[in-house]
Image: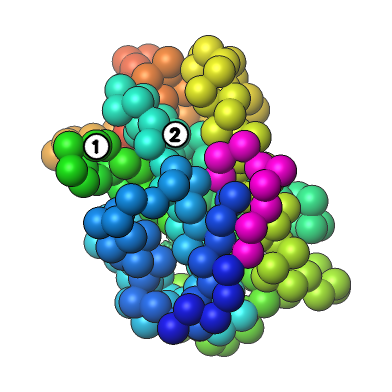
């Protein structure tokens, strides 16, 4: 059920209108349903909990009360849309740092603090009425008790509440986050993508680490070396050969 609607005319695109729900299946799905009507670019769907939250690679995203679950609708040029999902990790990290958690980005866009995931992004491209849209969903473990997350997730996850001895209301976090996303989206549309990728590289804590990645059917073990201009993570294997990794299983080795 919709429980509120917030407007902020100071934002350029993202977050000028926020629809607040108590519970939804998934904010990404609600955003996609809204595409059937003529909605403005940048519209945000925010929910207090999700009953069927989704993560990347078909995984579930546990969404108990206390966490922040939001999605927004963008209409970027299709050519670079995948990169947008990568770059949106930056505003998420910026917001976490603003509120006291010095998080970094695990490639492609997981926000991680001390090897524990604190936020994730699910970016999905969808055509509606011949127009290409991207629905970007962000889940942040803000005021969640770690014990409310599934047992198998707990050792690999953390929450803002656990790391910072200061209560941050979801509304306040979302407000700051949307300002950052709005800025990033405006830069994305007006700046050369290589410049943004350089910024991304600086925040990507996977660079320099030894990793194991599945690329197609092959396992590649080596050092995460660079971010290519197409957004791929470049891995240099032990023989010095370079491999581009985009999506799939990526493990950071100790
Ligand atoms: C991941 O790291 O696997 C991505 C997690 C994305 C979770 C968010 S919560 C808001 C939005 N709605 C969903 O169902 N998923 C995304």
Q: Which region shows up in magenta?
A: 6-14
Give the spatial CA distance, label 2 vs label 1: 17 Å
Give residue 51's position: percent from left, percent from top. 37, 82
Give residue 177's position: percent from left, percent from top. 66, 52
Residue 248 falls left or right of residue 74: left
Q: Is residue 114 magenta?
A: no
Q: Is residue 95 visible?
A: yes
Foreground mark, 2 or 1, reads 1
Give residue 144's position: percent from left, percent from top. 62, 79
Q: How many marks?
A: 2
Assign the magenta stretch its main secondary structure: loop
The image quadrant that residue 166 belongs to is bottom right
Which SS class for mark 2?
helix
Q: Residues within 10 Å of mark 1 (few under 14, many from 20)?
A: few
Residue at x 50% of width, y 57% of height: 44
In contact (CB < 8 Å): disc 2 and disc 1: no
Residue at x 56% of width, y 45% of height: 14
Give residue 8's position: percent from left, percent from top. 67, 52
The image quadrant that residue 230 belongs to is top left
Q: Is residue 9 magenta?
A: yes
Residue identifier under label 1 = 131
Of all residues shown, which one is farthest toward the left?
217
């Amino acid at each position: 059920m919709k429980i509120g609607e917030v407007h902020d005319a100071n934002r350029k695109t993202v977050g000028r209108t926020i629809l607040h729900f108590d519970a939804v299946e998934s904010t990404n799905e609600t955003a996609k349903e809204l595409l059937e009507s003529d909605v403005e670019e940048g519209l945000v769907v925010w929910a207090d909990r999700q009953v069927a939250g989704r993560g990347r690679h078909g995984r579930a995203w546990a969404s108990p009360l206390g966490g922040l679950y939001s999605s927004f609708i963008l209409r970027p040029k299709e050519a670079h849309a995948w990169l947008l999902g990568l770059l949106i990790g930056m505003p998420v990290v910026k917001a976490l740092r603003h509120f006291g958690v010095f998080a970094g980005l695990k490639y492609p866009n997981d926000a991680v603090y001390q090897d524990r995931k604190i936020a994730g992004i699910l970016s999905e491209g969808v055509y509606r009425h011949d127009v290409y849209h991207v629905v970007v969903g962000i889940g942040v473990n803000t005021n969640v008790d770690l014990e409310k997350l599934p047992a198998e997730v707990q050792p690999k996850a953390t929450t803002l509440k656990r790391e910072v001895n200061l209560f941050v209301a979801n509304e306040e976090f979302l407000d700051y986050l949307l300002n950052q996303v709005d800025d990033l989206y405006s830069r994305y549309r007006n700046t050369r993508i290589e410049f943004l990728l350089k910024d991304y590289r600086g925040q990507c804590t996977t660079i320099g680490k030894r990793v194991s990645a599945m690329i197609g059917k092959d396992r590649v073990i080596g050092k995460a070396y660079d971010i290519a201009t197409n957004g791929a993570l470049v891995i240099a294997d032990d023989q010095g050969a370079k491999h581009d990794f985009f999506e799939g299983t990526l493990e950071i080795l100790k």
